[in-house]
């Protein structure tokens, strides 16, 4: 019984980590797209992108 609960807990941790990683990736992509849009609209006069 204890082994099964441990396996369920580890699966839950892995799923949570995958969701967190996906959200972080989407956030980075969104920030990069917004920065590129700013550069495009300002004709390349925008400051360089923040180091992520």
Image (cartoon, rainbow, N blue to C red):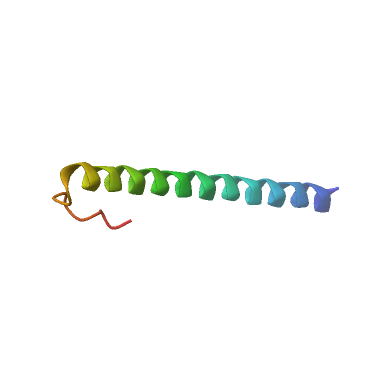
Instruction: Count numbered badges in the picture.
Output: 0
Residue under the point 41% across and 48% down: 29
Please state which of residues 44 and 51 is positioned toward the viewer in this rendering: 44
Please state which of residues 30 and 42 is positioned toward the viewer in this rendering: 42
Q: Residue furthest right?
A: 1
Residue 5 located left or right of residue 32:
right
Residue under the point 21% across and 41% down: 41
Residue under the point 17% across and 52% down: 44
Image x and y of residue 5, in percent: 78, 47
Please state which of residues 35 and 5 is positioned toward the viewer in this rendering: 35
Residue 26 located left or right of residue 33:
right
Image x and y of residue 51, in percent: 28, 58
Image x and y of residue 17, in percent: 58, 50
**Quadrant position of the C terminus in the picture:** bottom left
Image x and y of residue 11, in percent: 71, 49
Q: Residue furthest left?
A: 45
Please state which of residues 32 and 12 is positioned toward the viewer in this rendering: 32
């Amino acid at each position: 019984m204890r082994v099964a609960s441990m396996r369920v807990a580890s699966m839950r941790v892995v799923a949570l980590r995958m969701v967190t990683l996906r959200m972080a990736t989407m956030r980075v992509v969104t920030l990069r797209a917004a920065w590129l849009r700013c550069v495009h609209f300002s004709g390349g006069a925008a400051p360089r992108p923040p180091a992520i």
